[in-house]
Image: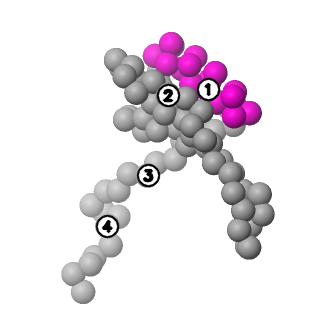
Amino acid sequence: MLLGGQPKHPTDPWFAMRYFGENSAWLGYGGANVYTRSGKPPEAPDARQALEKALAKGGLRMSELIVVDNTCSADNQVDQAE
Protein backbone atom coordinates (compact mmCIF):
# COMPACT_ATOMS: atom_id res chain seq x y z
CA MET A 1 0.00 0.00 0.00
CA LEU A 2 1.45 3.33 -1.01
CA LEU A 3 1.22 5.64 1.99
CA GLY A 4 2.49 8.74 0.23
CA GLY A 5 5.42 10.41 -1.40
CA GLN A 6 7.01 13.54 -2.74
CA PRO A 7 8.84 12.32 -5.86
CA LYS A 8 9.44 15.86 -7.11
CA HIS A 9 10.62 17.40 -3.84
CA PRO A 10 13.58 19.66 -4.76
CA THR A 11 15.98 18.31 -2.11
CA ASP A 12 14.47 15.20 -0.47
CA PRO A 13 12.27 13.12 -2.80
CA TRP A 14 10.73 10.08 -1.09
CA PHE A 15 8.06 7.35 -1.18
CA ALA A 16 6.63 5.39 1.76
CA MET A 17 5.02 1.97 1.40
CA ARG A 18 3.44 -0.43 3.89
CA TYR A 19 3.16 -4.16 3.24
CA PHE A 20 1.23 -7.01 4.82
CA GLY A 21 1.01 -10.70 4.12
CA GLU A 22 0.99 -14.25 5.31
CA ASN A 23 2.18 -17.62 4.11
CA SER A 24 2.31 -21.18 5.42
CA ALA A 25 5.39 -20.42 7.54
CA TRP A 26 4.52 -16.99 8.89
CA LEU A 27 1.06 -15.64 9.61
CA GLY A 28 0.56 -11.92 9.79
CA TYR A 29 3.85 -10.31 8.78
CA GLY A 30 4.17 -6.71 7.73
CA GLY A 31 6.36 -3.67 7.65
CA ALA A 32 7.15 -0.49 5.80
CA ASN A 33 9.77 0.90 3.48
CA VAL A 34 10.72 4.52 2.96
CA TYR A 35 12.58 5.02 -0.31
CA THR A 36 14.92 8.00 -0.69
CA ARG A 37 17.85 8.80 -2.94
CA SER A 38 20.16 9.40 0.01
CA GLY A 39 19.22 6.24 1.93
CA LYS A 40 18.30 8.40 4.93
CA PRO A 41 15.00 9.92 6.04
CA PRO A 42 14.28 13.33 4.52
CA GLU A 43 15.91 16.22 6.36
CA ALA A 44 13.93 19.09 4.84
CA PRO A 45 11.29 20.08 7.43
CA ASP A 46 8.42 20.06 4.91
CA ALA A 47 9.43 16.64 3.54
CA ARG A 48 9.87 15.23 7.06
CA GLN A 49 6.44 16.50 8.11
CA ALA A 50 4.80 15.05 4.99
CA LEU A 51 6.52 11.69 5.59
CA GLU A 52 5.34 11.59 9.21
CA LYS A 53 1.80 12.33 8.05
CA ALA A 54 1.97 9.58 5.41
CA LEU A 55 3.30 7.04 7.93
CA ALA A 56 0.46 7.92 10.32
CA LYS A 57 -2.01 6.85 7.59
CA GLY A 58 -0.48 3.38 7.88
CA GLY A 59 -0.51 3.41 11.68
CA LEU A 60 3.26 4.02 11.94
CA ARG A 61 5.57 6.60 13.51
CA MET A 62 9.09 7.63 12.49
CA SER A 63 10.34 6.54 15.92
CA GLU A 64 9.31 2.95 15.11
CA LEU A 65 11.47 2.73 11.97
CA ILE A 66 15.15 1.87 11.64
CA VAL A 67 17.56 2.81 8.86
CA VAL A 68 18.89 -0.23 7.01
CA ASP A 69 22.10 0.08 5.00
CA ASN A 70 21.60 -1.94 1.81
CA THR A 71 24.70 -0.65 0.06
CA CYS A 72 27.28 -3.04 -1.32
CA SER A 73 30.98 -2.33 -1.30
CA ALA A 74 33.79 -4.02 -3.21
CA ASP A 75 34.90 -5.61 0.08
CA ASN A 76 31.57 -7.40 0.49
CA GLN A 77 31.11 -8.76 -3.03
CA VAL A 78 31.00 -12.50 -3.58
CA ASP A 79 33.69 -13.81 -5.91
CA GLN A 80 31.73 -15.21 -8.85
CA ALA A 81 34.79 -16.07 -10.96
CA GLU A 82 34.68 -19.73 -9.92
In x, y percent, where is residue 4? 55, 29
Question: Gap between marks 2 and 3, in whole Å?
Answer: 21 Å
Question: Gap between marks 3 and 1, in whole Å?
Answer: 23 Å
In terms of sequence position, does the residue under pointer 4 or pointer 2 come before the other? 2
Q: Does the CB distance between marks 3 and 1 fall below 8 Å? A: no
In front here: 16 or 78? 16
In terms of sequence position, does the residue under pointer 4 or pointer 1 come before the other? 1
Tell me, yes or no, if residue 40 can be seen here. no
Circle nearer the viewer, 4 or 2: 2
In terms of sequence position, does the residue under pointer 2 or pointer 1 come before the other? 2
Q: Which residue is mark 3?
A: 70
Q: Is residue 56 left or right of residue 77?
A: right
How was this image coloured? one colour
- Farthest residue toward the left? 81
In x, y percent, where is residue 42? 47, 25
**From the viewer's perspective, is residue 60 above or below residue 20?**
above
Q: Secondary structure at mark 4?
A: loop
What residue is shown at x 31% (from left), y 56% (from top)? 73
Question: Gap between marks 2 and 1, in whole Å?
Answer: 8 Å
Q: Does the CB distance between marks 2 and 1 fall below 8 Å? A: yes
Question: Gap between marks 4 and 1, in whole Å?
Answer: 35 Å
Question: Gap between marks 4 and 3, in whole Å?
Answer: 13 Å
Q: Secondary structure at mark 1?
A: helix
Q: Which residue is mark 4?
A: 77
Query: Which image quarter is the N terminus in?
Result: top right
Segment tinted magenta in the rendering? 44-62
Q: Which residue is mark 1?
A: 54
Q: Does the CB distance between marks 4 and 2 fall below 8 Å? A: no
Question: For the image shown, how many numbered marks are present on the structure?
Answer: 4
Tell me, yes or no, if residue 30 can be seen here. yes
- Farthest residue toward the right? 27
